[in-house]
Image (cartoon, rainbow, N blue to C red):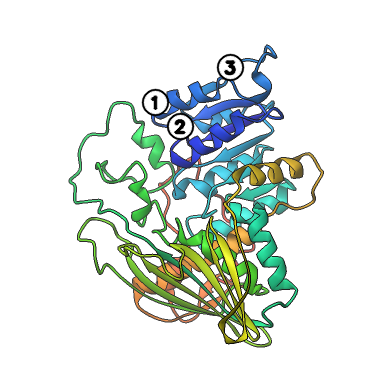
Amino acid sequence: MLGVIGTGGMGMHHVRALAQRNDVQIAYVCDVDRDRLAEAARLAQGSGLAQGSGQAAPQAVGDLRRVLDDPRVDAVLIATPDHWHAPAAILALDAGKHVYVEKPCCHNVREGEQMVEAVERTGLVLQVGTQSRSTECVREAMQRLAEGEIGEILVAKAWNSQRRSSIGKRQPSDPPPQLDFDAWLGPAPEVPYQANLLHAVWRWWHAFGCGDIGNDGVHDIDVALWGLNPTGHPMRATCFGSKSFFDDDQQFPDTQYAVLEYPEERPRQLIFEQRIWSPYDQEGYANGAAFYGTEGVLIIGHTEGWRLYGPGDRLLTERTGKADLNAHHSDFLECIRGNRQRPAADVHVGHQAATVVHLANIAARLGRVLEFDAAQTKIRDDEEATALLGRTYRAGHWATPRPNSSSAAGR
């Protein structure tokens, strides 16, 4: 039995996909917006095992603790805003539930560490919603890279090149009557409601999201890391980022260029480019990644396909293919049932990709190079940057993640 927590855009994709399966039952849908909750409950009504089986209809609740307190629930899917990802996931793991959590898996680096610790502490399954990891077309491309078809990969580049819309400028106002805004805020610091804070646009605010690099960009960063295959986190990161186009309330850059270096035997670079005002696709793909090897190049587009080139820009092979959410669900469920040992997008790869997002955002926000000490979770000789590896929580809130003994060391 499953619970879906957060029934906005991606949450509704999960409800629709799971409702078509005959091997699961959606027992709960949960949201702080009563209108969204009602629509999700309607769609989940005929889900899978419930059809013709006499099973109870899904319960629609506004407090995720109702879902976690039910011992019948085996797993939850978390599709909340970013600031709720880690708190909800850790609560669920500690309640004995397997977790599928949307990307980025955490709002900051320290929350990512806490998620890793929670998975290790509980021994439960956690899958991150970077569905390229389960998409057969992408898996073939990564296998070709692993087999050395373009030689040794020294540089990978990911990009987000598309036209977004302005979120405008708004003043504080009363929240709409169907919204429990206090519950939406959760453990984040209390701020007044305003119309361009939610829904969906929360991702442009420091306290609640991670910018578009953490929205669409993290999909491509994850694929870039998959092919580059570094052994850990970057040792050095910098990022130029600014609002070059939009004159609105969003707090993250609309234009961003990040470079991160990994301490391998031969240092490797990861590059990320973002232009969310661009009316054209880069390298033929609005969102994608490129792998620069000593014997060739592979260029892959998120949800579109890939092209592999040899020396002299000679196209050797190509393939098209769409992202496969159903396969990602299946991978998660097979791990829960013990048929697979490790999910395709486990907590470690999710934390690795999210760390790139967070370091790039910190570097852009402060305008400097960061020397990252992953073992101590700090930026060397930079207390201001180190503080941004975590966050401030609302005093005494029940969902505040508890400190890690390991990540607290050295601070």
Instruction: Judge the density around disc 1: few (<14), some (14-19), many (≥20) Cα neighbours within 10 Å.
Output: some
Residue 387 position in % (x across, y down): 43, 67
Q: Which SS class for mark 1? A: helix
Q: Could you tell which of marks 3 and 2 lies nearer the N-terminus? A: 2
Q: Quadrant of residue 114?
A: bottom right
Q: Which dot, 3 or 1, sits closer to the camera?
A: 3
Question: Hey, what amino acid is under mark 2?
Answer: Asp
Residue position marked by numbered label 1 in the rendering: 34
Residue 135 position in % (x across, y down): 64, 53
Q: Could you tell which of marks 3 and 1 lies nearer the N-terminus? A: 1
Residue position marked by numbered label 2 in the rendering: 31
Residue 148 position in % (x across, y down): 73, 78
Give the Cα separation between the discs numbered 2 and 1.
7 Å
Residue position marked by numbered label 3 in the rendering: 57
Give above or below for 385 relative to 400.
below
CB atoms of marks 2 and 1 within 8 Å: yes
CB atoms of marks 3 and 1 within 8 Å: no
